[in-house]
Image: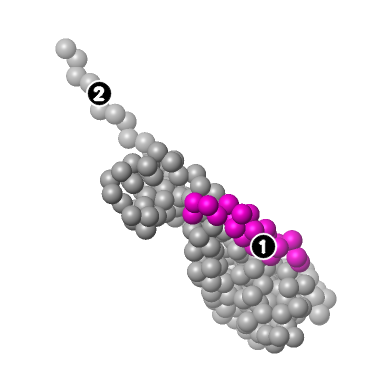
Amino acid sequence: MTALAPAARPRRRVPWGALLWPALLLLCLWPGVLPNLLAPFSAGEAPDVSDSPLWRLTLVHLALVFGAEALVLLIGLPLAVFVTRPGRAALMRLAEALTGLGQTVPTLAILALAVPTLGLGLRPTLLGLVLYGLVPVVSNGVAGLLSVDRSVLDAARGMGMTPGQQLRRVELPLSLPILLAGVRTSTVYNVGTATIGAALGAGGLGLPIINGLSQQNTGLVLVGAILSALLALSLDALLGLVARRGSSGTAG
């Protein structure tokens, strides 16, 4: 009788994106590297970024994005839970329609309307980022919670779980992969949207873009654009890695 061969272990995929994009971002943040590379686009001279070091602008940009995403989660996740409870289908449609306005109205229009009330700087920028980032978090949260198999919920109810226990122990863990996909999309969107905040004095990687446009300096514009793109790709890859691990943990 022949012995059974051991089952082959699945290969772990190397997260090249989560390694490559952050490495390129760090390389471009090294003093002088990116400006010297872009000198041909700036009349042969490296764009002047001495007023604000690129690493500091990147940290400010990250703070804007993460601060907005924290507010998006504090608003969007409870809202998704609230409207997906039984008997609230009309509220669910209303919530999705209202949050969808954040992406149908141009971001510049939202900021222009917010400035007279909130002034310049951080507050109107955060408002625009939150309104723009709510849509994927709310829509994915709703989709994830509605995708939970009813038979699983019936089994949890049969075990004596309260509605709150069902939500914490069953619904949220099972809907986590879809919710994380919404957070990933929202974060990447807001990396690009946050560049507009520089026009309001919020700083970040939009500052070299604004300065480059005012000085007609293509190299300076590219400094902000390239760093914003690398930051978005880095966060997308890292959040994708977190989402895959969350999915495997849920499946396990």
For label 2, the residue is: 5
- In the image, 205 versus 189, the foreground residue is 189
Residue 6 place in picture, x, y as percent:
25, 28
Say which residue label 1 marks.
98
Quadrant showing the N terminus:
top left
What stretch of residues is rendered in magenta?
85-106
Which numbered dot is residue 88? none
Dot 2 lies on which element?
loop
Which residue occupies the extreme left position in the image? Answer: 1
Q: Nearer the viewer, mark 2 or mark 1?
A: 1
Q: Quadrant of the C terminus?
A: top left
Q: Residue at x 62, y 60 (%)?
A: 95
Residue 118 visible, this angle: yes
Q: Is residue 223 magenta?
A: no
| Sooner in the amino-acid sequence: mark 2 or mark 1 | 2
Q: From the viewer's perspective, is residue 160 above or below residue 124? A: above
Left or right placement of residue 48 versus residue 61 in this view:
right
Q: Position of residue 127 (x, y in %)?
A: 64, 75
- Magenta stretch: dominant SS? helix
Q: Identify residue type, mark 2.
A: Ala
Which residue is at a point 31% across and 43% down the rendered structure image? Answer: 158
Query: Pointer 2 and pointer 1: residues touching (CB < 8 Å)?
Result: no
Residue 140 appears in the picture as rendered: no
Which kind of residue does numbered mark 1 sit on?
Answer: Leu
Left or right: 208 as drawn, with respect to 234: right
**Location of residue 174 in the rendering, given as x and y in whole percent from the top left corner:** 42, 48
